[in-house]
Amino acid sequence: MAAPKMLKLPEVLEEIGMSRAAFYRMRARGKAPRLVKLPNGHLRVRRSDLDDWLNRLDSPTY
């Protein structure tokens, strides 16, 4: 079985169009996708976690 796709934080930030500071504020409130800390200290987000998080967001405003 293939390992899950892991995204680097800059890749996630670019995809969701958010600054690092805004992302960490959201994370502090428990509203950001889950981060995985690798043994080398780098942070990653599983593709599946990001997709799930995006699907759970409120409906867009018009």
Image (spheres, helix red, strand yellow):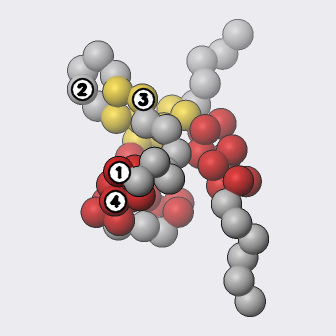
Q: Amino acid at mark 1?
A: Ala
Per the image, label 1 sits on a secondary structure element best described as helix
> Of the residues under marks 2 and 4, which one precedes in the sequence?
4
How busy is the neighbourhood of tag 1: few (under 14 within 10 Å), some, or many (20 plus)?
Answer: few
Q: Amino acid at mark 3?
A: Val
State if disc 4 and disc 2 touch (CB < 8 Å). no
Above or below, 40 against 44 in this view is above
> Of the residues under marks 1 and 3, which one precedes in the sequence?
1
- Which numbered disc, 2 or 1, marks the residue closer to the eye? 1
How busy is the neighbourhood of tag 4: few (under 14 within 10 Å), some, or many (20 plus)?
Answer: few
State if disc 3 and disc 2 touch (CB < 8 Å). no
Mark 2, residue position: 41
Per the image, label 3 sits on a secondary structure element best described as strand
> What residue is at 60 percent from the left and 18 percent from the top?
3
Mark 1, residue position: 28
> Of the residues under marks 2 and 3, which one precedes in the sequence?
3
Cα distance in 3D space between marks 4 and 3: 17 Å
How busy is the neighbourhood of tag 2: few (under 14 within 10 Å), some, or many (20 plus)?
Answer: few
Instruction: Name the side, left or right, on which 57 lies relative to 10.
Output: right
Q: In the image, which disc is placed on residue 25?
A: 4
> Of the residues under marks 4 and 3, which one precedes in the sequence?
4
> What residue is at 75 percent from the left and 71 percent from the top?
59
Above or below, 53 against 49 in this view is below
Instruction: Name the side, left or right, on which 43 lies relative to 56.
Output: left
Cα distance in 3D space between marks 2 and 4: 20 Å
Tell me the quarter of the picture where residue 22 sits. Answer: bottom left
Per the image, label 2 sits on a secondary structure element best described as loop
Residue lying at the far left of the rendered structure: 41
Cα distance in 3D space between marks 2 and 1: 19 Å
Cα distance in 3D space between marks 1 and 3: 15 Å
Residue lying at the far bottom of the rendered structure: 62
